Amino acid sequence: MSAARSARAPAQRPKTPSAPRAALPRETPEARARRALEIVRRLRARYPETRLPLRHRNPLQLLIATILSAQSTDAQVNRVTPALFKRYRTAADFAGARTSELERYVHSTGFFHAKTRAIQRVTRALMERFGGRVPRTMEELVALPGVGRKTANVVLSGFGVQGIVVDTHVRRLSRRMALTAHDDPDKIEQDLMRLIPHGEWSGFSLRMIFLGREICFARAPRCPVCPVRDVCPSSRYAGTPPWMAPRGARPRASA
């Protein structure tokens, strides 16, 4: 037998199982529902106006603007869209556009190659399936290429349809507030739909986004000045609660 075959493989160290994340604070469903309603009330008082930040004049423009907002800011998208929507007015215009020209219009929003492909795929699908019109149902919207529930809920809000948009802010804040134990946006949406009154869905989403931009930052949230501090279990941990901490990390306690 050769030396190579007879050589023993190095011993493998046994893997240490990772510690599970801490569970949400103990709370009855009824108590969580009451707390959620209080959060709704306080956010409504803090942000009485809930206009969509993406400027648009019709559902097609809102769909395009929402696609462009991925990994970008609403302010940057709003700087781009006036010239974009003046050049391309219909789904047919976008679908038939020269790719290189469309890319120049959306370049400053970032990931412009992917966004241009997404815009042309979805507008071509609109032409093929809906005569260039944006559909008005969740089922039809999510069947379009590249359109998930978050984008669909944004577009439906333009039709006046209530929906909970789970973007990065809503995802982070709903977990900090212990309104959900999930990390998956679709599951978070379902949890929030059970807690938040139907007529508040769209406004609640926008107000959570506003709070996330103003106070409840991903890093160093401003818990002492937060309007929902006393009904948010994370405030005692300075916004880094154990149920959101990486496995094995120790949460910070607030001063």
Image (spheres, helix red, strand yellow):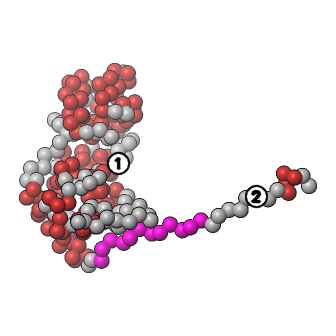
Q: Is residue 87 left or right of residue 101?
A: left
- Residue at the (23%, 66%) spot, across then down: 255
Whole-percent x, y for residue 112 in the image: 36, 30
Whole-percent x, y for residue 74 in the image: 22, 39
Element at badge 2? loop
* Disc number for residue 246: none
Viewer-side residue, 242 vs 96: 242
Badge 1 vs badge 2, beta-carbon distance below 8 Å: no
Residue at the farthest front position: 255
Say which residue label 2 marks.
Answer: 9
- Which quadrant would the N terminus be assigned to in this image? bottom right
Number of numbered markers: 2
Say which residue label 1 marks.
Answer: 148
Kind of residue at disc 1: Gly
CA separation in Å, label 1 and label 2: 48 Å
Q: Is residue 164 magenta?
A: no
Residue range (magenta) = 15-26
